[in-house]
Structure formats: structure tokens, C-alpha cells
Amino acid sequence: MKTTKKLLATAAAAMLAAGAAHAQISDGVIKIGVMNDMSGLYADIGGPGSVLAARMAVEDFAPEKKGMKVEVVSADHQNKPDVGSTVARTWYDVDKVDAIFDVPTSSVALAINQITKEKGKAFINTGAATSDLTGKQCSPNTVHWLYDTWMLANGTGGAIVKTGGDTWFFLTADYAFGHALERDTEAVVLKNGGKVLGKVRTPFPGSDFSSFLLQAQASKAKIIGLANAGGDTINSIKQAAEFGITKGGQNLAGLLVFLPDVHGLGLATAQGLIFTETFYWDLNDQTRAWSKRFAERNGGKYPSSDHAGVYASVLHYLKAVEAGKTDDGTKVVAKMKEMPTDDPLFGKGTIRADGRKIHPAYLFEVKKPSESKGPYDYYKVRATIPAEQAFRPLKDGECSLVK
């Protein structure tokens, strides 16, 4: 009888402990919102693949074994700040979403950054590039996980100038992302003794880049810097090939290139392109194993770095919710910064006071068709940029959170 009473008491204590552990989970559910471009020029980079990556992270975290309940919802922001803002407010105010993930398109991300801070929720960005998210517009509620314009500029721009590409002409997508990428890359080019011979702002999104490419060709700049992404990058590169620009001796620098872009272009068109990324499916055994799982559920398409970033950041977010026993956005982001990061895709890392996630970056070159051994075997590593050098120094960002 005593043994039975003891067992009942132990079970009751365990239940109370579990209840206390998750008492601060609002409405008993951790709700994750994946917001991105589901149908436009960035849909292959993020889109439904990011939703799949988030669901895989939840499955691998196994919340039910920890007495937690996690839901994933998604929305298309159509690359419009007003659409993204409306979705975010509805998610936070009505649908009780606790955290928003992905959000490519810097103009949308900057709007979500502000709303998230006002509402005390969490914003973990992987898709947008503007380094302002951890600079002048840094927030205690935002983590910037994957890459940013400073990293891209210093990785690609710095490497190209140092190897002789010292005159540049920019084709720049005319919105927050393009402007930030041009600004950060121009600073690197000038710092390394290069010159910018010209720049042109292109409509976003665009389809016909011919007049802009002809201006770049006429400038005789050694490097044509593509400060654009997704469908705009693909169209720029295809049209440059049609004009014989690269055959004429000028080189294209893809300042933001993803695996689906190279896949869409094909190796015959993309070969020799140099760019910086923080993830590639074929880096090691762990990235290969995860990417194979992802591709099996994604119609055979291999993951972009954005998909990898969503998976890794959702995993770390859930670990922080569990450790902090709360889904309060401000507290969870603080816990995410406090805890070291560790996942199969980016390895061990940290999140700084300004919200910048730190990990190595890689300078890649697209293989020639003859070098590729099979589907998605597209990149070769030209250089590894150590984590501590890959991102803007903490002191230089002008973030108010940095003491």
C-alpha cells in the first residue's frame, strides 16, 4: 500500500513539474509562422520548401516527447511590405502565432522586425539580406540567422577585388535589399583599392535587363556586380550570356546566388560564377544525409541555404523555448543568444548581442559541366571564411543592444 501511495505521489509530482515547465506557454501551443514568397521570383529559394524545412525541424525536435505542442502555419507575403505587415499583425493579434521565420525581401523583413518588437514576439530571419537587421534597426526580438549583405559583400566582393577584379559596374534591384547590397559591396571594393565605374537601378521584380546590361558592357568594367536575387539574377545572367558579355572578357559577380538559381540556369550558363553562401548540401556527411531526406519529400529538389537556415533556426528556437519554459518572444530570443547553437547543418555556433548568428561562410565557384558527377553536384569550394571573419564586427554595426 505504501509503495502504491509512493508511486502515485511520484507520478503527481512529475505531472506538476511538467505542468509548471509549460505553464508559461501561452494557450498551450507554440505556433510558428513561415512567411515568404510562395509563388514569385523567390519561391524556389524559400517558398513551400521553407515550410517543409520547418516541419522537419519540429519532427526532429519531437515536442510530444517533451510534453509540448507545436504547430506550423504559412503565408505568402508576395514580396510586398504592406501584405507582410498585415499577415504579421493578424498572426500575432488573432491567430496567436509566437514566432515568424524566413521572410525574404528586405523591405518586408524590416517591417516585420518593427511589428515583432512592438508585439513582444520573436522574428528569426533567414531569407532577407539587409545587414541593417543587426545594425541600426537591430531589435531584442530578432535573430538574423543565415547571411547578410555585409557577409556577401566581404566574401564575394573582397575575394574578387583581391584576385584582379578591380573595376565594377552594379546592376541593383531598386529596393532595400539591392541598395544595402550595393552599398556594402561598393565599400569593400573601394577599401581594397578598386573603382566603381557606374551603377544602374533596375525595377523589382524585373524581366528585361538588356538596356542595363548594355550600359554595363559599355562601361568596360571588369566585373558586373549583380545586386539582385532569385529570378532577377537568373534573367540577368541568361541575358548577359545572350549578349556575349562574359565571352567578351567581363565577369559577372553574383552577389546573392542560391542552389535553385544555378539549377535553373544550368551549368553551361552558370559555370565559373563566383559567390558566397553559408550552406551547401554536399559539405559533409551530416549535410548530405539531411539534404537527401529533404529532397525525398521535396519532389527530388535539393535544399537551398534558406531551407537549411529555416530548419536550423526552428530547431534552436524550440530548444530555447524548452530551456526557458516560455514562448514569450523577448525571453526566447534572449535564451537563444545565451545558448550555444548546434545542429547538423551549420555545426556549432553562437548568436551575438546584436542578433547576428555566427557561422563560417564559403566562397564557391560553379563547376563546368564536365566536372559535375550528377544532379545538384554544382559547387566547388574556393575558400572557407572562418566564422569570426565572415560577419561584420560587432562594434561596427551601430546596434543599440551592443554595450
Image (tube, helix red, strand yellow):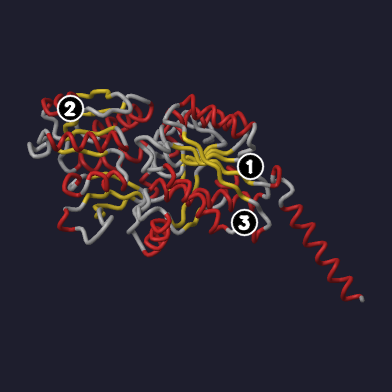
Q: Mark 1 or 2, which is nearer the eye?
A: 2
The residue most toward the front is: 299
Picture quarter containing residue 291?
Answer: bottom left
Q: CA distance from mark 1 to mark 2?
A: 50 Å
**In the image: residue 145, left or right of residue 121:** left
Name the quarter where the N terminus is drawn.
bottom right
Q: Nearer the viewer, residue 95 or 21?
A: 95
Q: Secondary structure at mark 2?
A: helix
Q: In percent of the image, x 71 and y 51: which residue is there?
A: 22
Of the numbered discs 1 and 2, the one sitting upstream in the chain is 2
Quadrant that contains the C terminus: top right
Residue 345, position as x, y percentages in the image: 42, 56
Badge 3 crowding class, 10 Å Cα cut-off, few under 14, some 14 to 19, many 20 or more, is: some
Percent coordinates x, y for residue 390 in the rendering: 36, 45
Helix, strand or loop for disc 1: helix
Q: Type of residue at label 1?
A: Lys
| Amino acid tagged 2 | Ser
Q: Which mark is residue 210?
A: 2
